Image (cartoon, rainbow, N blue to C red):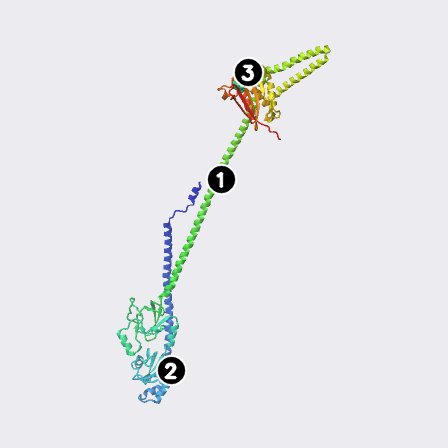
């Protein structure tokens, strides 16, 4: 697997931008749905809870009022039994400052004070008030006729009268309870107690609720909101207005509808049986809204305690619940998305690690394969090196063998010359020794001594020749050493002396400093020189002119090199021979005269010394060939 493949593995699943947008929209929709659902449920629950709470409180207010009213229910009945009131009623109404009326006034005042009433008064059967607890106040009821008040009418007719209304004399509202004073079975007047409901109203104001007390016509006569007092829940019809005017219940207040309750910005007629469930009005300090109304009947006059509920509170609370739900949903989604992202990141990391492992494995496999290849290549190379070494060794051995063969060939060719070289002193030795004998017999000792000295010199010379041939033919090593150029040339000349003489050639040499030396091997350098000089002599022998029977061996040091030139004046090297000069077994000489190895071996030897060997025709215009050896000069330490 390649790296590129690995990257392809790492690519996330191809899900487009559109998909992500769709998921985001779906999540948003879920959040909105959760929010809306929670809002709806919470609203329903809050409405129910508040309705229940409001119901409980409405009941509480109703019971509170009922017990307040009940406390005063029997009070006028008891008071009616009082004797002083009878006396006052039976007295002539025209009589002023009469004692019985004063006694009635005092009694009523006592009752009022003792039971915490707003007032208590006594009305005769014509409706005229003849005594009152407030007889001594400017707002005294005494002299007022209340025949129009329902409580008077009802008490005279039915035995008990109840009424709530604005005081005709005082202008203060109150709950009136009336009972007849009877003479036998006939009512002769009415005792009335006026109960002040201010304390109850104050309780409503303090309650924190919006609580109203409405009568059977829908008139609000007690309210926790003071400015709503004497407003109506719904409109009043003509009959209702007439009835209210007749009793002057709320005079002088003008009764106007509170808010709208038909849903279209108008008020509907009030019905005690089906009172309006909503009223659209502005609570103090708030904007107009539709409030729910919850009723609880109270008392015997068709009153109802009404508690108003602002649905905005519930909506606000439900909204908080809805927002919380939406937020919680969003949070859940956020957590899910975060988890999903983390999981995806982990998967990607996992994939990346797997790809990396794959790449590593691949790399390791490749390294192993490459190592194996290299090892085998190395082994092959080592084999080749070994083979090369072997080849070189064989080459070296072959070359050494060739050099040796060359030497032996030269010796073979020189055998006749060498024999001659040794024969000549041998003959001289014989002659000299014979002469010595004869001279000894004659007693010429001095001459004998002279002969012996000569013999000794000849023997020494022969020994030198033999030892030199021995050294030349020995299979010596080719180690480089400092070799005297002069010495090498002289030894070579000695070896070919016989051949030279036979050919009648003169070899000219430079006189050289003996310490001029090159890096070579003495025997092998001699071998090369022998080859070159012998070839030069052979070529010279072919030349007809006697004046050209010269071979010149010249030596020339050039910087770090020493150049040795062997020059002849023979026919030179033919053009077809020139390129094959150093080819082994190439010869132009007659059978047996040449082996064709001389130059080939010479080239191998010189190159072995790190030098150069070149053969060419002379360049100075005269005929003949020249062979040039260049060898590294031995530089002596100064
Ligand atoms: P060989 O002497 O046995 O023939 P060499 O290798 O020494 O073998 O010489 C090869 C050939 O080079 C000779 O046969 C001859 O033709 C040519 N040659 C060598 N030296 C000379 C020279 N000085 N002048 C002309 N030809 C030469």
Q: Position of residue 134 (x, y in %)?
A: 36, 83
Do the numbered discs 2 and 3 sit on residues whose CB atoms are within 8 Å?
no
Q: Residue at x 36, y 65 (%)?
A: 312
In the picture, the disc for residue 593 is: none
Q: Earlier in the sequence, mark 2 or mark 3?
A: 2
Say what secondary structure mark 3 lies in.
Answer: helix
Mark whose residue sits in front, 2 or 3: 3
Answer yes or no: is residue 35 visible.
yes
Answer yes or no: disc 2 within 8 Å of ligand 1: no
The residue labelled by disc 2 is: 112
The residue labelled by disc 3 is: 547
> What whole-number distance in Å separates the C-alpha atoms at marks 2 and 1?
116 Å
* Drawn side of residue 564 relative to residue 284, left or right: right
The answer to whether 330 is drawn above or below residue 195 in the figure is above
The answer to whether 184 is drawn above or below residue 268 in the figure is below
The residue labelled by disc 1 is: 364
> What whole-number distance in Å separates the C-alpha atoms at marks 2 and 3?
192 Å
Near-viewer residue (43 or 371): 371
Q: Position of residue 427 (x, y in %)?
A: 65, 12
Answer yes or no: disc 3 within 8 Å of ligand 1: no
Q: Residue at x 37, y 52 (%)?
A: 21
* Drawn side of residue 310 relative to residue 447, left or right: left
Near-viewer residue (311 or 395): 395
The quarter of the picture where the N terminus appears is top left
* Drawn side of residue 604 relative to residue 463, left or right: left
């Amino acid at each position: 697997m390649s790296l590129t493949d690995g990257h392809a593995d790492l690519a996330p699943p191809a899900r487009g931008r559109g998909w992500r947008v769709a998921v985001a929209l779906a999540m948003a929709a879920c959040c909105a749905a959760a929010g809306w659902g929670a809002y709806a449920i919470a609203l329903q629950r809050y409405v129910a809870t508040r309705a229940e709470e409001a119901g409980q409180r409405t009941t509480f207010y109703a019971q509170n009022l009922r017990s307040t009213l009940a406390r005063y229910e029997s009070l006028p009945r008891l008071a009616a039994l009082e004797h002083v009131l009878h006396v006052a009623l039976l007295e002539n109404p025209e009589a002023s400052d009469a004692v019985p009326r004063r006694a009635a006034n005092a009694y009523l005042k006592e009752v009022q004070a003792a039971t915490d009433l707003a007032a208590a008064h006594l009305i005769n059967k014509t409706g005229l008030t003849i005594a009152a607890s407030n007889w001594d106040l400017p707002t005294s009821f005494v002299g007022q006729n209340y025949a129009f008040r329902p409580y008077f009418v009802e008490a005279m007719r039915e035995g008990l009268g109840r009424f709530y209304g604005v005081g005709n004399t005082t202008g203060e509202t109150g709950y009136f309870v009336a009972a007849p004073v009877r003479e036998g079975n006939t009512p002769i007047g009415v005792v009335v107690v006026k109960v002040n409901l201010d304390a109850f109203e104050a309780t409503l104001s303090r309650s924190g609720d919006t609580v109203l007390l409405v009568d059977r016509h829908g008139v609000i006569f007690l309210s926790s909101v003071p400015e709503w007092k004497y407003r109506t829940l719904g409109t009043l019809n003509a009959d209702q207005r007439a009835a209210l005017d007749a009793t002057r219940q709320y005079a002088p207040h003008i009764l106007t509808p509170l808010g709208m309750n038909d849903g279209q910005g108008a008020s509907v007629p009030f019905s005690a049986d089906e009172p309006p469930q909503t009223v659209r009005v502005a609570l103090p300090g708030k904007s107009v809204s539709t409030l729910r109304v919850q009723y609880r009947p109270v008392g015997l006059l068709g009153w109802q305690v009404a508690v108003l509920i602002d649905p905005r509170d519930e909506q606000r609370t439900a909204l908080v619940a809805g927002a919380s739900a939406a937020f919680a949903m969003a949070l859940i989604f956020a957590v899910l998305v975060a988890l999903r992202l983390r999981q995806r990141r982990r998967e990607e990391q996992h994939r990346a690690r797997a790809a990396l492992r794959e790449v590593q494995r691949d790399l390791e496999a490749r390294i192993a394969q490459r190592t194996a290849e290299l090892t085998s290549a190395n082994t092959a190379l080592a084999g080749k090196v070994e083979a090369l070494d072997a080849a070189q060794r064989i080459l070296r051995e072959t070359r050494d063998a060739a050099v040796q063969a060359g030497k032996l060939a030269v010796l073979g060719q020189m055998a006749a010359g060498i024999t001659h070289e040794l024969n000549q002193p041998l003959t001289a030795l014989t002659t000299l020794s014979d002469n010595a004998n004869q001279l000894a017999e004659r007693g010429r000792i001095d001459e004998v001594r002279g002969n012996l000295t000569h013999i000794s010199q000849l023997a020494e010379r022969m020994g030198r020749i033999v030892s030199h041939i021995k050294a030349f033919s020995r299979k010596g090593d080719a180690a480089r050493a400092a070799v005297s150029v002069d010495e090498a040339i002289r030894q070579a000349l000695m070896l070919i002396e016989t051949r030279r003489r036979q050919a009648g050639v003169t070899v000219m040499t430079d006189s050289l400093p003996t310490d001029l030396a090159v890096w070579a091997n003495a025997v092998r350098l001699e071998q090369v020189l022998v080859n070159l000089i012998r070839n030069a002599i052979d070529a010279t022998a072919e030349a007809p002119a006697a004046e050209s029977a010269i071979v010149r061996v010249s030596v020339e040091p050039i910087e770090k090199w020493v150049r040795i030139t062997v020059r002849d004046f023979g026919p030179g090297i033919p053009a077809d021979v020139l390129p094959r000069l150093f080819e082994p077994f190439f010869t132009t000489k007659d059978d047996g005269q040449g082996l064709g190895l001389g130059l080939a071996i010479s080239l191998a030897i010189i190159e072995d010394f790190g030098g150069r060997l070149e053969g060419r025709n002379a360049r100075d215009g005269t005929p003949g060939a020249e062979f040039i050896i260049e060898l590294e000069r031995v530089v002596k330490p100064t």
